[in-house]
Image (cartoon, rainbow, N blue to C red):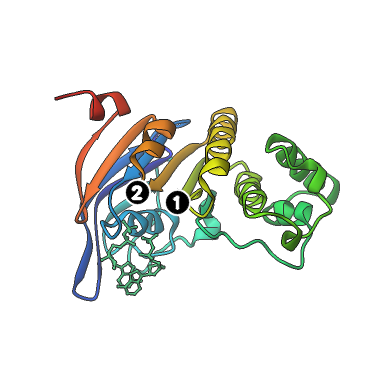
Amino acid sequence: APVLAMHEIRHAYQENLAVEDVSLEVKPGEIVCLLGPSGCGKSTLLRVAAGLERVQQGRVELGGESMGSGRSHVPPEKRNVGLAFQDSALFPHLSVLDNVAFGLESLPFRQRRRRAYELLELLGMERYSRAFPHMLSGGQQQRIALARALAPAPQLMLLDEPFSSLDARLRDRIRDDTLHVLKKVGAGVLLVTHDPEEAMFMADRIVLMRDGKVVQAGTPLELYCTP
Ligand code: ADP
Ligand code: ADP
């Protein structure tokens, strides 16, 4: 089963229709980029997938399981998804290691710390394990937010403009590393971006949106190399 399937999702804020009959799938290990201009409904779709918004119309399934609709809504913390946003705030009073270990409360103490440390190593941040968030640069904090999202080994990662608060040089490097890590852990990914270059670089498949609708979908080659 796909890690994420969204069927005919429609979502409105009062009378403002933000998403109109969008269907999409993310297969295991696949990176799908939602690409389109600001205001076209990308974040709304991601928030519906995460359970931060209730399904108003349509269906959401994670690993083949329905996430409910209306009253029977499965909340974000019960969805086994990793979330990272543009300005993912770390917990300021927790060390870097404890930030990454935060979602692992089901593990015994030592395993929890070992797992968190592994994630820090994967992102090249192990030497900051005892530091506190305010001691880190924006790019370093971004890496920690990613490590925290990946730590519980979610089947699906939902990333909303995860690099856009970084300056251009840093962004290229962190994108590179992130792509490498995502491929290594094999999670399915739905990544929101307004940057075509980022989508070209990261995506196995691009879903192009405009005014709340999908206008085109395909591999980067299919989207950019056909007349
Ligand atoms: P994108 O992520 O592509 O920038 P959004 O999903 O954030 O698009 O927004 C889609 C539309 O929904 C926009 O018109 C936006 O103003 C509106 N919108 C988004 N969030 C809210 C909200 N919480 N309340 C009201 N309108 C919203
Ligand atoms: P993005 O384009 O990344 O979604 P925005 O700046 O459009 O970022 O939105 C930032 C926050 O404001 C989001 O939580 C979104 O839901 C909310 N928002 C966006 N548009 C509106 C709106 N018209 N009314 C109320 N909240 C909104």
Q: Are marks 2 and 1 in contact (CB under 8 Å)?
A: yes
Q: Earlier in the sequence, mark 2 or mark 1?
A: 1
Q: Residue at x 52, y 37 (%)?
A: 172
Q: Quadrant of the N terminus?
A: top left
The amino acid marked with disc number 1 is Glu
Q: Secondary structure at mark 2?
A: loop
Q: Are there few (<14), some (14-19), or many (20+) residues within 10 Å of tag 1?
A: some
In the drawing, what numbered circle is on residue 192? none
Q: Are there few (<14), some (14-19), or many (20+) residues within 10 Å of tag 2?
A: many
Q: Name the quarter showing ligand 1.
A: bottom left
The amino acid marked with disc number 2 is His
Vertical order, 96 against 120 (above or below)? below
Residue bearing mark 1 = 161
Q: Is residue 96 left or right of residue 15?
A: right
Q: Residue at x 20, y 70 (%)?
A: 16
Q: Residue at x 40, y 33 (%)?
A: 203
Q: Quadrant of the C terminus?
A: top left
Q: Residue at x 25, y 28 (%)?
A: 224
Q: Secondary structure at mark 1?
A: loop
Indicate the position of residue 104 as horizontal and vertical percent values.
70, 51
Residue bearing mark 2 = 194
Asked whether mark 1 and ligand 2 are closer than 8 Å, the reply comes as yes
Asked whether mark 2 and ligand 1 are closer than 8 Å, the reply comes as yes
Find the distance from the CA under tag 2 to the CA under tag 1: 8 Å
Q: Is residue 65 left or right of residue 120?
A: left
Q: Is residue 156 left or right of residue 14?
A: right
**Residue at the farthest left position:** 227
Q: Is residue 77 left or right of residue 43?
A: right
